[in-house]
Image (spheres, grey):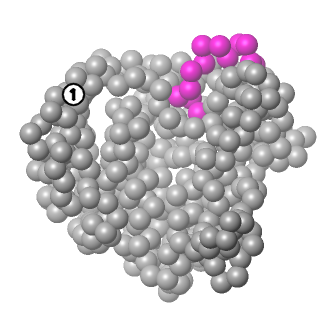
Amino acid sequence: MNPIRNSSPQPSGRASAGAISNGVKVAARIEKIPEYIFSRLNKEVAAIEKDVGRKVLNLGPGSPDFPPSEIYVQKFFEFVRHPQAHLYPGYRGVQEFNDAVRAFYKRRFDVDLEDNEVLPLLGGKDGISHLPLALADAGDNVLAPNPGYPPFSEPGPLFGVSSNYYDLLPENGFKPDLAALGTQINDKTRYMWINFPGNPTGAVATHDELKTYAHFAKKHGIAVVHDNAYAEITFDGYVAPSILQIPGAKEYAAEIGSFSKTFSFAGLRMGWLVGNRNIIASLQKVKSQMDSGMALPLQLLGAFALQNRDEKWHEAMLASYRSRRDIIAEKLKGLGLTFSLPRGSLYIWAKIPDAAKDSESFCKDLLREKQVMLTPGIAYCSNGDRYIRASICANVDKINEYL
């Protein structure tokens, strides 16, 4: 199975490497990956705005627009003036950062972490996209959800690593069917991705469900990596667990965390990987060749934010997203879309009307006719082709002018 995520044109004209019109040859591996979905959609939005002369209501990207707490902004200014702010930060987290992540996991999940079980990331996507280099060799494969966040699978072919897609279906609440998943593992399978609260589906998992996924990975001798970037973006009484709460999980599991959504630091590119020390050490070694670490002011800001969460601000942020979720939901119903309200993440995953051709056609028609952008579900793999993803972190003050 090789699901196509989108139909964007790929570079053409190549011999052993991809020759382009000006005579420069690029690596053949470039043809193995598509353009990132939001890079492509941004071009479509710009073209429509130019043609129509009206700003598009863009419910596509999950870019949190709720401004960061002023407390964090002022601390960031302070940390930028740190006497060592201009120096290379090193390839491990500074002690303040590591200690703050460890304290957060103890306080939030009652999970104990050692210093060598924490690694700062330049945003969660940094760790996600580089893990194939750390955990798999050319010819190996990883278990990736369908539908799922594109970086779980799309960078792999750059390194000769393929994805063995497993189904997330509505009849299972968009959660893995472990009986079916067990038949997809082979001797080249190295690790498994899970993601709750989920992008794009908004599906959430209980502690017991995470336990079954963790035990599944252990039984089959593979690692499991949990993308927990939306752990603090939850609604209606749901509280997200960590896979590291499962006894013994650090023997084979790791978890991605992010400041992007929790603190509205998306543009600052701040995150972490915690868990199995071999996974941590391997990714750290890869990243030592790829970047020079997270800047010291950002590490200090992250440490401060984790240790001094502005609860009043956090509650206001969640209230804003909850309100927007409900407003957008009513508008989507008016378009004939069907869905369940998400209890976590920043997205509504909605099924398109039966009469619609496919998700991309539905979204393109809506963009042309109403200047509203939704993300076509096919961008998240083949099981998404009858769905769209609507972001609930976009400004909806003028939504009545569009829908």
Q: Nearer the viewer, residue 106 or 2?
A: 2
Type of amino acid under label 1: Phe
Q: Nearer the viewer, residue 214 or 394?
A: 394
Q: Is residue 179 left or right of residue 290?
A: right
**Residue 387 within the magenta-colored segment of the rendering:** no
Q: Is residue 368 above or below residue 283?
A: above
Kindly give the residue lying farthest to the right in the view shown. Answer: 355
Residue 67 in the image, given as x and y percentages of width and height: 40, 23
In terms of image quadrants, where is residue 83? Answer: top left
Residue holding disc 1? 77
**Residue at left 70%, top 82%?**
15
**Residue at left 62%, top 70%?**
24
**Residue at left 44%, top 53%?**
125
Q: Main secondary structure of the magenta part?
A: loop
Q: Is residue 116 above or below residue 227?
A: below
Residue 324 seen in this snapshot: yes
Residue 182 seen in this snapshot: no
Residue 26 in the image, given as x and y percentages of width and height: 60, 71
**Residue at left 80%, top 39%?**
364
Kindly give the residue lying farthest to the bottom in the view shown. Answer: 187
Residue 297 in the image, given as x and y percentages of width and height: 20, 40
- What range of the chain is rendered magenta? 391-403
Query: Mark 1: few, some, or many residues within 10 Å (few <14, many ≥20)?
Result: few
Residue 391 in the image, given as x and y percentages of width and height: 59, 33
In terms of image quadrants, where is residue 56? Answer: top right
Q: Is residue 88 left or right of residue 265?
A: left
Q: Is residue 390 left or right of residue 141?
A: right
Q: Is residue 321 left or right of residue 308?
A: right
In terms of image quadrants, where is residue 232? Answer: top left
**Residue 400 within the magenta-colored segment of the rendering:** yes
